[in-house]
């Protein structure tokens, strides 16, 4: 019997306990939501979920009705319309409308029904395009946004400010986190809509299977990105919920960055692909860097556990596990 880690809420210096609380993970089937479910199952709380088919979080009256009926005491908003650089650029209206509506409806109703603790999720991509690196939380709204994801960023910035407004005026204990680029179980492996790590693992795997001589990488390979395994994020979010209460958002990252070219080489090593990596510079690079300053989270006492190479191996194993199984060969009687 493996020793169960100490539930977060009973660790010392915790300021909020999840014990016996009704905890709603909005978006529980997404990559972040499912990681939160895995992590929260180690806590002594009651988990509430509702499928997208049962409740459209963009419909205010439906959200109000469901939340009044279910009475969550803690809410983590992991529901969002998300995607990689190409998805953000090509589905502008969806990214701003969906994410504004979700934030407005859930945060407002949480205040109306007196939710004890709410966690709102932003992203490292809501910082200005050309920010001093590493980026500190006070640099938010200090300059023009990255054009490729300004739609998503505006919606997330509005959600951050809404959560802050309910703290400032009504004293609601609503906190916000700004995660860096994420990867891991439950990632979206669609080559047009997904983020870079999922896309690279799939492209490299398929090229290896087909015996292709080269694989296309978008952009120049020069931009630098920070990556965090989604299970580390989930642990960080539970830690933040139980150890932080403040109006300023908190960066959550690994503190390390790699160039896209370095990432592609690491991914090729994990997959076992030895062909050429070819850069398609007609695709956008996005911001040159997005490294988060993680001092606040470190000072709170949390650190990530998963190094990038090990995380890539885990992500590749997840990719392989969701591939359709080859039909069993009918054994000759
Ligand atoms: O992960 P990604 O789509 O998002 O792209 P961002 C990161 C970098 O990888 C960009 C390059 O410079 C891409 O050009 N890249 C190389 C690729 N090959 C590929 C590929 O095959 N697919 C993808 N997707 N990228 C997102 C925001 O920005 O960050 C989102 O648009 C979100 O809103 C996310 O916030 C965290 O890091 O550029």
Image (cartoon, rainbow, N blue to C red):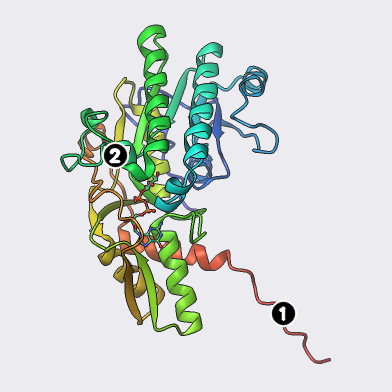
Q: Nearer the viewer, residue 142 or 280?
A: 280
Label 2 crowding class (10 Å Cα cut-off): few <14, some 14-19, many 20+? some
Q: Nearer the viewer, residue 283 or 57?
A: 283
**x, y (%) of residue 271?**
41, 74
| Residue 302, numbered label | 2
Is label 1 in a helix, a strand or a loop?
A: loop
For the C terminus, which image quadrant?
bottom right
Residue 146 picture quarter = top left
Q: Is mark 1 within 8 Å of ligand 1?
A: no
For marks 1 and 2, give the one nearer the viewer.
1
Q: Residue at the left extreme?
A: 132
Label 1 crowding class (10 Å Cα cut-off): few <14, some 14-19, many 20+? few
Residue 310 picture quarter = bottom left
Residue 159 as seen in the image, left or right of residue 52 = left
Residue under label 1, please give it: 328
Q: Residue at the front extreme?
A: 282
| Residue 92, numbered label | none
């Amino acid at each position: 019997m493996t020793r169960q880690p100490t539930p977060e809420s009973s660790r010392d210096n915790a300021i909020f306990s999840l014990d016996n609380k009704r905890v709603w993970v909005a978006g529980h089937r997404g990559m972040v939501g499912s990681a939160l479910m895995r992590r929260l199952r180690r806590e002594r709380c009651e988990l509430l979920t509702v499928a997208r088919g049962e409740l459209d979080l963009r419909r205010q009256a439906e959200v109000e009705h469901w939340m009044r009926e279910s009475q969550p005491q803690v809410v983590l908003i992991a529901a969002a319309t998300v995607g990689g650089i190409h998805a953000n650029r090509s589905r502008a209206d969806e990214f701003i409308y969906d994410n504004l509506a979700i934030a407005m409806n859930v945060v407002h109703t949480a205040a109306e029904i007196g939710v004890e603790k709410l966690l709102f999720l932003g992203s490292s991509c809501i910082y200005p395009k050309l920010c001093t690196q590493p980026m500190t939380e006070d640099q938010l709204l200090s300059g023009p946004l990255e054009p490729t994801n300004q739609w998503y960023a505006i919606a997330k910035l509005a959600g951050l400010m809404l959560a802050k407004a309910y703290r400032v005026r009504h004293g609601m204990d609503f906190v916000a986190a700004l995660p860096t680029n994420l990867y891991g179980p439950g990632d979206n492996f669609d080559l047009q809509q997904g983020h870079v790590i999922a896309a690279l693992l799939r492209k490299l795997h398929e090229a290896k299977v087909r015996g292709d001589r080269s694989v296309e990488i978008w952009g120049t390979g020069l931009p630098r990105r920070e990556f965090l395994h989604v299970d580390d994020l989930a642990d960080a979010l539970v830690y933040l919920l139980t150890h932080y209460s403040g109006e300023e958002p908190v960066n959550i990252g690994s503190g390390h960055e790699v160039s896209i070219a370095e990432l592609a080489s690491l991914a090729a090593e994990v997959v076992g692909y030895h062909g050429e990596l070819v850069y398609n510079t007609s695709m956008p690079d996005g911001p040159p860097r997005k490294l988060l300053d993680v001092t606040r989270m470190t000072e709170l006492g949390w650190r990530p556990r998963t190094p990038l190479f090990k995380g890539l191996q885990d992500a590749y194993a997840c990719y392989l596990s969701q591939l359709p199984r080859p039909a069993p060969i009918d054994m000759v009687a």
